Every structure is written in structure tokens, then in C-alpha cells.
Amino acid sequence: MFLLFPPLAAPGQELLRLEKSADAMGSTYSIALYGTDRIKMEAAIDAAFDEVRRLDELLSNYKPESEWSQVNRDAATRPVGVSLELFGLLGACLEYSRQSEGAFDITVGPLMKVWGFYKGSGHLPHRPEVLAALGKVGYRHIQMDPGAHTVRFRSAGCGDGPRGNRQGLRSRPDGGGLEAETA
């Protein structure tokens, strides 16, 4: 996520630049702030990275204990109960998939795997690999039960999103969890 705010410094005040980076969800996140109060800037960056770490705990494919990893691991065999936050995010993702007629699809994980995008080992897959992966892709493979707040996959191996949506996430300004950015 990239935020840009114009620097405002009163005449005679020194404009400071503070930059920090952290790794989460298989990516490096960097924040650069400009301002005049180093203490407030440090606090703002710390709060932002606290949110990045919170999202990592919820959505990481790299942490077996994350809520999303649990869905990927178990939803093909049984309905998996999820938090209201994840349920809402997945519901929004499925709605974007419906509206885009599948152009936006959080189930692209199988294709990303055969192309080697997860571990940075990209390669040209063989046609049978691609065809097998395509059989697992499709947002219609995801079933959601609003009453029970559960998620289930109709097809084994169709998960691995919302990887494509994570960079399109933002924390709600009121601190009330996640929402998907709509450009």
C-alpha cells in the first residue's frame, strides 16, 4: 500500500524524513513519512506495522496457524468457521468476482503454483499442469454460509487467495477491521 501526503512544515521548521520496512505475507512493506515531529512519526509507522502484522496473522499463506491457512487446509473437506472480518472480506472478494465475471478471482492460487510464482521460481509449465490447475480455479468453487459464518470449497485445492487481493486491502479508517479497496 502506498500513501502520499504532502509535507507541511511551518517556516523555520526542519522537515524530517523517516523510513522503515518490514516483511510480512511474503512481501516487504516500506513506509516513508515526512513531518516535523519525530515522535508522532515513529508512532504512526509503528501503528501501521502493527496492522501489517495483524493482517499477516489473519491472511498469511506462509503461516500454518493463520486463519486463511486453516481455510485453505480444511475447507475442501468440511465447512470452516471464520471470523466476521475474514467472512466479510471473502464475501467482498466473491462479489468483485461476480461483478467482473471472474476477471478478479481469489482462487487463482493453483495457477500461481504451476507457474512458480509463490517461491520466486517462475517457470513455463507444461500444458497438462495448466489444465489441471484450471480445473481448480473459479470463484464459484467457494461456498459461504452467512448464518454459520463458514466457508467451504466445492473443489479440493481451489484456495490460496485472497493473495491477489491482499495488496488491495486497507484498514478501515474507524479501526473496525479490513475493507477491500475499490480503486
Image (cartoon, grey):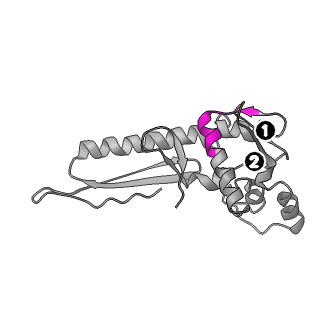
Where is residue 125, by image quadrant? Answer: bottom right
User: What kind of residue is marked 1?
Assistant: Ala
Between 127 and 123, the one nearer to me in the picture = 127
The image's mark for residue 75 is 1
Q: Is residue 121 left or right of residue 37?
A: right
Query: Which residue is depicted at the point 78% across and 36% down?
Result: 74
Q: Is residue 125 above or below residue 9?
A: below
Q: Is residue 22 left or right of residue 36?
A: right
Residue 98 appears at what percent x and percent y? 71, 57
Q: Secondary structure at mark 2?
A: loop
Query: Which residue is depicted at the point 68% across and 63% down?
Result: 100
User: What kind of residue is marked 2?
Assistant: Gly
Residue 153 appears at what percent x and percent y? 80, 43
Q: Please name the predominant secondary structure of the magenta segment in the image.
A: helix
The image's mark for residue 1 is none
Where is residue 121, by image quadrant? Answer: bottom right
In 3D space, how far apart are the residues under numbered discs 1 and 2 (Cα atoms)? Answer: 9 Å
Q: Is residue 151 left or right of residue 183?
A: right
Q: To which residue does mark 2 refer?
A: 159
Q: Secondary structure at mark 1?
A: loop
Q: Contact (CB < 8 A) between labels 1 and 2?
A: yes
Between 76 and 60, the one nearer to me in the picture = 76
Magenta stretch? 80-89
Q: Does residue 143 show up magenta in the picture?
A: no
Q: Would residue 61 be seen by someone viewing this image from the given angle?
A: no
Could you tell which of marks 1 and 2 lies nearer the N-terminus? Answer: 1
